[in-house]
Image (tube, rainbow, N blue to C red):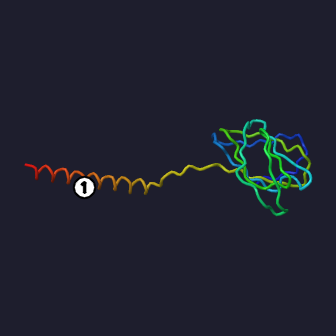
């Protein structure tokens, strides 16, 4: 988890070793109940709110405008839409503490054992199909 205090013009930079598509940002305690804080992304054009809810300091809310996520004690998950090798953002509002984690969607890849079982099953079906075909030809002659 990354933690921030906000209130600076520092540009934060996250670099991925290869392009990632639609990364998720899990947000904790963004802003306070009366003063909002934000993550302002300079290279993200579209953000989707996936979920929001209660956090340690109460029930807050998140709002999205273009490439900026703003929270009033906001807790939740957003998806940064697009393909990225780098993310650049600022945390311009002064805030004591807030945090975020970045998650990458994972596409399931079958284990080698699964491929072997699939191949064995296909071979069995092929052999059964061939036996049936051979049996029908003998009966018809």
State which quadrant residue 34 falls in: bottom right
Q: Specify the quadrant that holds the N terminus.
A: bottom right
Q: Are there few (<14), some (14-19), or many (20+) residues within 10 Å of tag 1? A: few
Query: Would residue 137 be found to the left or right of residue 8 on screen?
Result: left
Q: Which residue is mark 1?
A: 128
Q: Could you say whether the residue bearing mark 1 is in a helix, strand or loop?
A: helix
Residue 66 percent coordinates (x, y)? 77, 38
Report the residue at 88% width, 49% height from top.
Answer: 36
How many numbered marks, from 0 up? 1
Report the residue at 83% width, 53% height from top.
Answer: 30
Query: Would residue 17 be found to the left or right of residue 117 on screen?
Result: right
Work out which residue is located at the far left of the displayed protein and give it: 141
In this view of the protein, which residue sits in the foreground, 116 or 57?
57
Report the residue at 86% width, 41% height from top.
Answer: 10
Residue 31 percent coordinates (x, y)? 87, 52
Relative to 13, say whether 50 is above or below. Answer: below
Residue 29 percent coordinates (x, y)? 83, 56
Residue 125 percent coordinates (x, y)? 29, 54
């Amino acid at each position: 988890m990354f933690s921030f205090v906000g209130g600076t013009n520092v540009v934060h930079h996250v670099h991925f070793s290869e392009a990632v598509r639609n990364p998720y940002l899990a947000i904790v305690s963004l802003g306070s109940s009366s003063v909002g804080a934000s993550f302002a992304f300079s290279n993200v054009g579209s953000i989707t709110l996936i979920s929001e809810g209660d956090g340690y300091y109460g029930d807050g809310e998140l709002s999205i405008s273009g490439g900026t996520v703003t929270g009033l004690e906001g807790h939740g998950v957003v998806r940064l839409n697009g393909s990225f090798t780098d993310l650049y953002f600022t945390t311009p509002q002064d805030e004591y503490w807030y945090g975020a984690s970045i998650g990458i969607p994972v596409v399931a890849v079958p284990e080698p054992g699964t491929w072997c079982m699939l191949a064995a099953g296909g071979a069995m079906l092929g052999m059964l199909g061939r036996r049936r075909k051979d049996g029908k030809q003998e009966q018809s002659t």
